[in-house]
Each structure stands twice: as structure tokens, then as C-alpha cells.
Image (cartoon, helix red, strand yellow):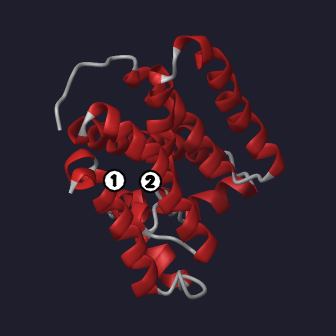
């Protein structure tokens, strides 16, 4: 009961991702490509008049390892942030950073590459991204302001270093751009720490 009072947003997100993973088969093996393309988010969804996929994509996962990753991100990063600031602020920051980072990555990275005729731009424009990592990364950026002052610089540098090195080790240009934008937005918006009760 304490968890429901302290982190209701996290618990709803956690349960939704897990439930859809079970229903759509991600937990057992692999999400059907047609579902990912139709309900995931990409620049093509904006062209097709389906902006609602900015929401639906958050709850989708591809395979068992991704289900585990998304529920871990939501359960740890989003959960801790919500515990500290309350469900309203956590919900607002999660969805704001998720939406804005998707739009920024689509319009500032993918669209120019597509218009330039780059093969990578065409590929990214027609693909779909899924998962809660952008909103989770936004919460991570905001959470840095709650790290004790003597550790804050080190933890912030480690988080920034991760976002620099990850694209080199495991490149996914569209997701990498979203994560960088979400992290920066979360850090910026998280500077303001008004008290919001649960």
C-alpha cells in the first residue's frame, strides 16, 4: 500500500509494459514487426497523421531482454524520481521529455538527413522506435539534481560519459539522439524543484 501511495505512476507504467509484453509476445520471444511499425513511433508516423504513436510506442518492447530493461528503467529511475518529487511531477517530466525528445530527434536529426537524401536518413524516417527509455532518460537527467552535492559532479560526468560512449559501442542513431535530447531536457527541467505532494 505504501508503494501505491508513493509511486502510483511508476507502478502503472511498470504493469502496462509488462502486461503488453505478455499479451503481444515480447516476453516469450519477439514482437511482430507489423505491430512495431504500426504502433511504434517514427517520422513516418507524423507524415501519416498518427501522432498518437508517441504514446503507444512507450509501452511496447521487442523481446524478453528489452522487457526486462524497460521495467528496470521504469522501476528504478522513474520510481526513485517519483518517490522524491511525487507522481504529478514525475508524470509531467516523463511525458514532456519523452514527447519533446521524439520530436527533436525526428525534426532536427532524422528529417534533415532524409531531406539530404542520406540512406541513414531514409532508413530512420521509415523505422519505428519503441520503449520507455526516452522518458526514463529524462527522469535520469532530472534525478541528478537530487544526488548529494559532493557526488553530483562525478555522477553527472558518468551519466554524460555513458551517453557519449553508448552510441560508439552500440549505435542506434535515432534512439541515441532521443536519449541525448531527453537527458538534457530532463536535466534542464529538473533544476526547478517545487514541492509537490503525492
Pinpoint residue 3: horizontal percent, then vertical percent.
Answer: 28, 52
Is 136 positioned to the left or the right of 174 in the image?
A: left
Q: Is residue 132 above or below residue 62?
A: above
SS label for mark 2: helix
Q: CA distance from mark 1 to mark 2?
A: 6 Å
- Specify whether residue 100 is in view: yes
Q: Is residue 118 above or below residue 25?
A: above
Q: Nearer the viewer, residue 197 or 122?
A: 197
Residue at 37 percent of width and 57 percent of height? 54
Q: Indicate which disc residue 74 carries.
A: 2
Q: Quadrant of residue 160?
A: top right
Residue at 53 percent of width and 85 percent of height? 32
Is 64 positioned to the left or the right of 87 in the image?
A: right
SS label for mark 1: helix
Q: What residue sits right under mark 1 in the picture?
A: 10
Q: Indicate which disc residue 81 carries.
A: none
Residue at 57 percent of width and 74 percent of height? 62
Amino acid at each position: 500500500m505504501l508503494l501505491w501511495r508513493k509511486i502510483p505512476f511508476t507502478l502503472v507504467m511498470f504493469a502496462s509494459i509488462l502486461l503488453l509484453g505478455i499479451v503481444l509476445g515480447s516476453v516469450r520471444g519477439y514482437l511482430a514487426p507489423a505491430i512495431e511499425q504500426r504502433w511504434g513511433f517514427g517520422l513516418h508516423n507524423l507524415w501519416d497523421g498518427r501522432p498518437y504513436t508517441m504514446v503507444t510506442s512507450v509501452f511496447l518492447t521487442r523481446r524478453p531482454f528489452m522487457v526486462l530493461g524497460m521495467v528496470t528503467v521504469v522501476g528504478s529511475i522513474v520510481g526513485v524520481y517519483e518517490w522524491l518529487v511525487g507522481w504529478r511531477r514525475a508524470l509531467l517530466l516523463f511525458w514532456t521529455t519523452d514527447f519533446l525528445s521524439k520530436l527533436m530527434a525526428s525534426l532536427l536529426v532524422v528529417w534533415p538527413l532524409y531531406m539530404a537524401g542520406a540512406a541513414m536518413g531514409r532508413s530512420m524516417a521509415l523505422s519505428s522506435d519503441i520503449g520507455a527509455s526516452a522518458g526514463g532518460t529524462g527522469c535520469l537527467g532530472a534525478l541528478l539534481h537530487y544526488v548529494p552535492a559532493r557526488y553530483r559532479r562525478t555522477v553527472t560526468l558518468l551519466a554524460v560519459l555513458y551517453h557519449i560512449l553508448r552510441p560508439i559501442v552500440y549505435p542506434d542513431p535515432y534512439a541515441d539522439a532521443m536519449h541525448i535530447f531527453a537527458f538534457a531536457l530532463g536535466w534542464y527541467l529538473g533544476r526547478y524543484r517545487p514541492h509537490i505532494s503525492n
